[in-house]
Amino acid sequence: MNKLEEYFKKISLNREPANLYNPIYYTLSQGGKRLRPKLVMMSTRFFGGDEEAALHPAAAFEMLHNFTLIHDDIMDNAPIRRGQPTVYKHWNSNIAILSGDALATLALQEMLHTPAQPETIIALTDLLSQTSVEICEGQQKDLDFETSENVSIDDFIQMIRYKTAVMLAGCLKAGAILSGATPADQEAIYQYGINIGIAFQLKDDLLDVYGDTNIFGKPIGGDIRENKKTYLYLRSLQDAQDTDKQQLLHYFSSTNFDEKEKFLAVTNIYEKLDIKHKTEAQIEAYVQKALVELGKISAGNETGKNDFITLANELSSRNK
Amino acid sequence: MNKLEEYFKKISLNREPANLYNPIYYTLSQGGKRLRPKLVMMSTRFFGGDEEAALHPAAAFEMLHNFTLIHDDIMDNAPIRRGQPTVYKHWNSNIAILSGDALATLALQEMLHTPAQPETIIALTDLLSQTSVEICEGQQKDLDFETSENVSIDDFIQMIRYKTAVMLAGCLKAGAILSGATPADQEAIYQYGINIGIAFQLKDDLLDVYGDTNIFGKPIGGDIRENKKTYLYLRSLQDAQDTDKQQLLHYFSSTNFDEKEKFLAVTNIYEKLDIKHKTEAQIEAYVQKALVELGKISAGNETGKNDFITLANELSSRNK
């Protein structure tokens, strides 16, 4: 992955205008999990593709991911990301809008420059652009939830499918496309990705309540403070009796409560309803669905598949 | 061009989530000059390409243009565009950021779906993405100018080259690529586009001071009110004597002046320095450069070239 870091430097370091490229370098060089490039590389290795060529889709997806972070942080008023000020906080909203725009385009350009057959390049770029549109749809659904009073758990899962899962699934499919995998295998690895992606996001929401700030890299309790309609909240609303339900609705109706008081009151109800374990069970269910999809893949061997099993378990038991 | 309007409806009307696609439909259906699609079609016709296929790059460039308007209006705090509230005013900033993001990606996807040889599709998409990156660079330079005290006329021309001219040049080159024009002809029509693009933007700045609100579609004097460093301002600063220069610097140091008083004082100095005619002379100079580039093109015939001559003259003498 060192080549990836080198490449990120090349596209954003010492490039003019500085106010456009410095925020891009700042974001890309912060690292993070680099989960998306890992998925592209894993999938390419599994399907026997060209790992050198795969660096391009790997970089492209990581860039697309970072673009979404830059813009989402403006929309969510998020001050901290990966333990550092977000771009709009460090610079300003206009610079965050514009450097995000440039990064999204650079991602697509990166994909276009993949050394592969023209048809493969087009399929990869189409996948990336489709992923990008769906992520916007997911983010808009998420924003719509803020003012919606009737969000079902199904609506929520649909939202995180678009907002988070399609990107992980897209990374895996990109490796399959690049390697010339059959359409059936492309679809199976994509569906594996959708399911680990949903598990991944549920875990993220869980960590926002039950994680350790120092390990997780961002403050705990932000979702509760901001009245985010997460799986934990929606499930508790579904399972709660009258008084607890009223309490939940009361606390999620405003951001003006004392932050600690609100966090304690809400997690108290979560505890009573066993929400932590219920969420963990949901995560496990999506991991199992992912493994069923994995079983459908005809290419590769058991050792290769074991890596995907390990990955699914790692994502669902991570603490950061 | 009716097919284009039909197509814009198809991609954005009745699509979910509504808060993502309604602003896209709102923007695309407002019309505007449709200059960019016209340029793609003119160029395709001139170079003898497939006009049916050209609708895709035509739509793609118009979509990219509209994406830049949605985001620029947030950054510039512009309330009105084409006589209507801008997206961020009509909805809000978050929706404007996100629907702009989606529209930019839909533009690239539209280009990818051009019915042409794979190599041609890649060349067209590469052109669109390169154009998009350069437009971001231009917009950032423009934002940087707001707080910069040393903006030369050369800096300014460089900025509008990226912010405005590369898109018009890109449209013309797209028609040439699609039609299989020689690299030399692609380059010449691109350079013609750069020069009419610069003339176009200078004319825009001129209309912002000397235009008629009802015809121009947006309020007059916005650039002066917002201390925009336009060609008119930079040229007057270059040509002004001591007192006038101090006056200009004074008025362009704040937005707290009475709007009418400021407009009158500044245009008074413009008049004294003959800035209107000097700007018109610059516009004419870029039109002439464009015609020199046009002369280098080996394809097409004189009648075809006449359309490009007419276009250059129309853009530079337009009043809206």
Image (cartoon, coloured by chain):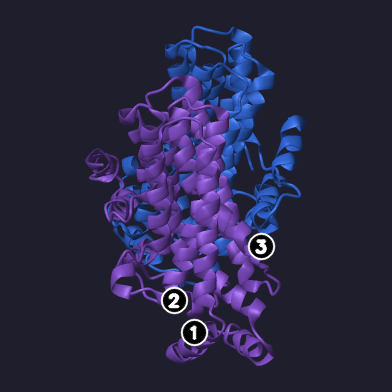
Chain colours: A blue, B purple
- Looking at the image, the residue that sits furthest to the front is B302
Please report, as a chain letter, where disc 2 is located: B
Q: Which residue is mark 1?
A: B267
Please report, as a chain letter, where disc 3 is located: B
Residue A34, horizontal then vertical, whole percent:
65, 36
Measured Cα–Cα span from mark 2 to mark 3: 21 Å
Measured Cα–Cα span from mark 3 to mark 1: 23 Å
Measured Cα–Cα span from mark 1 to mark 2: 8 Å
**For the residues bearing labels 1 and 2, Cβ distance under 8 angstroms:** yes
* The N terminus of chain A - image quarter: top right
Is residue B319 found left or right of A215 in the rendered image?
left
Residue closer to the observer: A90 or B319 = B319
Q: Residue at x 58, y 82 (%)?
A: B252
What kind of residue is marked 1?
Thr
Q: In what element is the residue under mark 1?
A: helix
* Mark 2 burial class by Cα count in 10 Å: few <14, some 14-19, many 20+: some
Which labelled disc corresponds to residue B209?
A: 2
Residue B282 visible here: yes
| Nearest-to-viewer mark from 3 and 1 | 1
Say whether disc 2 or disc 3 marks the residue closer to the N-terminus.
Answer: 3
Residue B312, horizontal then vertical, whole percent:
43, 52
**For the residues bearing labels 2 and 3, Cβ distance under 8 angstroms:** no
Residue closer to the observer: A137 or B207 = B207
Q: In what element is the residue under mark 3?
A: helix
Q: In what element is the residue under mark 2?
A: helix
Say whether disc 3 or disc 1 marks the residue closer to the N-terminus.
Answer: 3
Which labelled disc corresponds to residue B155?
A: 3
What kind of residue is marked 2?
Val
Query: Within the image, what quadrant is residue B61 found in?
Result: top left
Say whether disc 1 or disc 2 marks the residue closer to the N-terminus.
Answer: 2
What kind of residue is marked 3?
Asp
